[in-house]
Amino acid sequence: QVQLVQSGPEMKKPGASVMVSCKASGYTFNNYGITWVRQAPGQGLEWMGWISPHTGKTNFAQRFQGRVVMTTETSSTTAFMELRGLRPNDTAVYYCARDEDGYKSEIDHWGQGSLISVSS
Amino acid sequence: QSVLTQPPSVSGTPGQTLTISCSGAVSNIDSHYVLWYQQFPGTAPKLLIYKNFQRPSGVPDRFSGSKSGPSASLIISGLRSEDEADYYCATWDDTLGGRVFGGGTKLTVV
């Protein structure tokens, strides 16, 4: 079965960077993109961006341009999302999810989420 | 402010049919497929509806979706207490060049 298993919770200081990993299994990794979505405490879902493991093509939400890096490692079927210049309002649960084309396909399977806390 | 507008909360009684709306624009809902998600506290969202009205396997047929112009709806019939959750719509937005989510709707079954 399709599974996405994310890295654990982290606490960071403002200005630091964080990298969240997302290990995929149960499907052909290169055939589906990975979308990243975050959810601040008590808030709604916010799309951050998408990456294709096959081509390396990325598409980021405007508000994260220049601050987010998304990569994949085909050998380990793992996707990574690095967010730089952390601020307290980046405190959120970060989700990875399978998303075939990042455009018209459904975002169907989700990781369990990774809580990233930013505080001085 | 979300590009897609949902009511913050709705409530219903067991057995009732309830509709959650998602209002957008020509650049998003009117031009692209709509997705609907169900989320329980502390858990990841679950796909309920894709391509406006399609249900993934395992999703009860009590859940249905519709779309008309720049608006979409999630319809839940035969409401049950276990349907209490947050519901989100999502689609692509041409102006933003990315995916967008509605602000979410908290469903309470009284």
Image: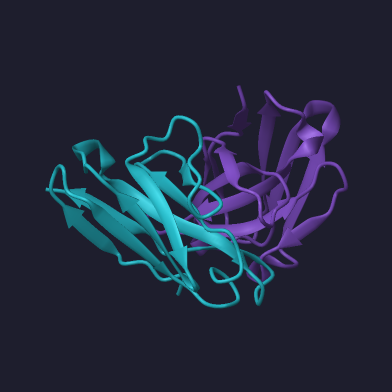
Chain colours: A purple, B cyan
Q: Residue at x 61, y 42 (%)?
A: A97
In the displayed structure, A117 sits above or below A90; it is above
| Residue lying farthest to the right in this orientation | A55
Q: Residue at x 77, y 29 (%)?
A: A28
In the displayed structure, A84 sits above or below A26; it is below
From the viewer's perspective, is B19 left or right of A119? left
**The N terminus of chain A appears in which quarter of the rendering?**
top right
In the foreground, B79 or A27: B79
From the viewer's perspective, is B91 left or right of B53? right
Q: Residue at x 16, y 43 (%)?
A: B15
**Residue B74 point in image, percent of width and height:** 37, 55
Give the number of callouts: 0
**Residue B27 point in image, percent of width and height:** 60, 76
**Residue A72 point in image, percent of width and height:** 79, 41
Q: Residue at x 25, y 44 (%)?
A: B84
Residue B82 appears in view: yes
